[in-house]
Amino acid sequence: MTLTNESDFERLKVIGRIVADVLQAMGRALEPGMTTAELDAIGRRLLEAAGARSAPELSYGFPGATCISVNEEIAHGVPGDRRIAAGDLVNIDVSAEKDGIFADTGASFAVPPTEARIARLTRDGKQALWTGVRQVAADRPLGAIGTAIQAFADKRGYSLVRNLASHGVGTSLHEDPKELPTWHAPEERRRIADGLVFTIEPFLSLGAEWAADRGDDGWTLLSEPRAPTVQYEHTMVATKRGPTVVTLPGAA
């Protein structure tokens, strides 16, 4: 989606705030002993109260309102009877639609007590995201985002999952520019259009390089090789002055 009017921008800010607030509320509710289905139910209730619809459910028939991935699961985790335990690393991805506009956000949460290496990974995962966000401005190369994130990861000794990319969003959950790399990709030649709406969502890891199909539920992706992995995601609009992030809590 490329914004061309203030009405669409206002609707984008509304749904951006909704998914951001739902993500933060789910993170606060996260505690050992609860199931991922119970956590998802909190997200569903909050989305419905805000007049929003789950994007993965609406767009793909996903069996849950949100994606919740635990430990070796790094993306598209299906909410169910898995119980969250102390020390787990939990990724929550919230995307939704309201009034015809979609926004997408996500974050990883370490359930205390937290190992030092996991605490560092979560801190650096957030920094990796913002390293990419700082590259955003109209007419800049899309490839600069992944190049900057790759340099950050290399400097700190991390790997990046290379088959889960960022994407355009707005009138649908996934749209052009598709397959936007969050790693160095010399073949990426596209440029950022003024008003372009898209996500940045690097998967920073202590060794994983790929996301592999789990197979038994048809949705959940696992780290390959198995290693702790975090993902942080924002939806933003590119302007000549830089990025306007719309998935900050209370941003609208």
Image (cartoon, rainbow, N blue to C red):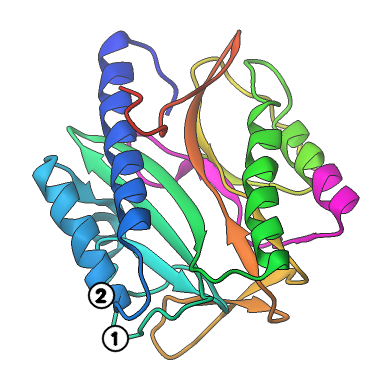
In the rendered image, the vertical position of residue 171 relative to residue 187, given as above or below: above
Marks 2 and 1, the one that precedes in the sequence: 2
Q: Tag on residue 37?
A: 2
In the rendered image, the vertical position of residue 242 relative to residue 30, given as above or below: above
Please count the marks in the image. 2
Is 158 or 60 nearer to us in this picture? 158
Quarter the C terminus occupies: top left
Circle 1: residue type: Asp
- Is 132 on the left-hand or right-hand side of 90? right
Q: Are marks 2 and 1 in contact (CB under 8 Å)?
A: yes
Q: Which residue is mark 1?
A: 81
Q: Which residues are magenta?
A: 150-175
The answer to whether any part of residue 109 appears in the image is: yes
- Is 238 on the left-hand or right-hand side of 106? right
Q: Label 2 crowding class (10 Å Cα cut-off): few <14, some 14-19, many 20+? A: some
Circle 2: residue type: Ala
